[in-house]
Image: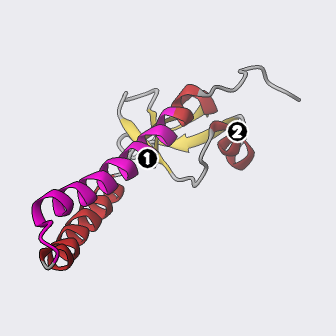
């Protein structure tokens, strides 16, 4: 999962380095308001945790596709002997890929739906 924020100066999205799975974890890690430097215009501005949006990372999709292809090849060899080659070898990798991708999308959606109060605490 990639966390991005839109620069207030140049309006380009840039990545925030964090391993937080929710905005509450991000708040614990960086604070409710934090400073981040844009990769495009190199200006540091203050951002609220709610301004951070999450996306599915490309590396996750590559891993899921690779896993699907490996499952396809292994199941083709295994189920070829049983005579179930087309029905099983196409369904199993597709099912695994769809499940992994939907789980990633759910975690991204949950991150983007949750919000933190904007009031400052002293």
Quadrant of the image for the C terminus?
top right
Q: Quick one: 12 or 26, which is closer to the camera?
A: 26
Q: Give whichever of 26, 113 is nearer the camera.
A: 113
- The label number, if any, that marks residue 104 in the structure image: 1
Q: Nearer the viewer, residue 18 or 61?
A: 61
Residue at figure coordinates x 51%, y 42% from the top left: 107
Identify the magenta region: 82-109
The image shows residue 76 at horizontal and vertical percentages of: 15, 72
Residue 18 in the image: above or below residue 72: above
Q: Residue 96: x and y, percent?
A: 33, 56
55 to the left or right of 69 = right
Q: Is residue 36 magenta?
A: no
How far apart are the alpha carbons under marks 1 and 2?
Answer: 18 Å
Q: Is 41 situated left or right of 26 in this image?
A: left
**Cβ atoms under marks 1 and 2 closer than 8 Å:** no
Disc number placed over residue 24 in the picture, else none: 2
In magenta stretch: residue 85: yes
Q: Nearer the viewer, mark 1 or mark 2?
A: 1
Determine if residue 51 is in view. yes
């Amino acid at each position: 999962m990639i966390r991005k924020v839109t620069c207030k100066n140049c309006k380009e999205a840039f990545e925030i380095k964090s391993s937080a799975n929710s905005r509450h974890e991000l708040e614990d890690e960086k604070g409710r308001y934090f400073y981040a430097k844009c990769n495009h215009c190199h200006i540091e501005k203050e951002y609220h945790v709610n301004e951070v949006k999450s996306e599915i990372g490309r590396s996750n999709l590559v891993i899921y596709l690779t896993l699907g292809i490996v499952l396809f090849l292994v199941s083709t060899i295994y189920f070829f002997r049983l005579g179930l080659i087309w029905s099983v070898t196409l369904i199993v990798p597709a099912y695994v890929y769809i499940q992994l991708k939907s789980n990633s999308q759910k975690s991204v959606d949950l991150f983007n739906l949750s919000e933190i109060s904007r009031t400052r605490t002293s």
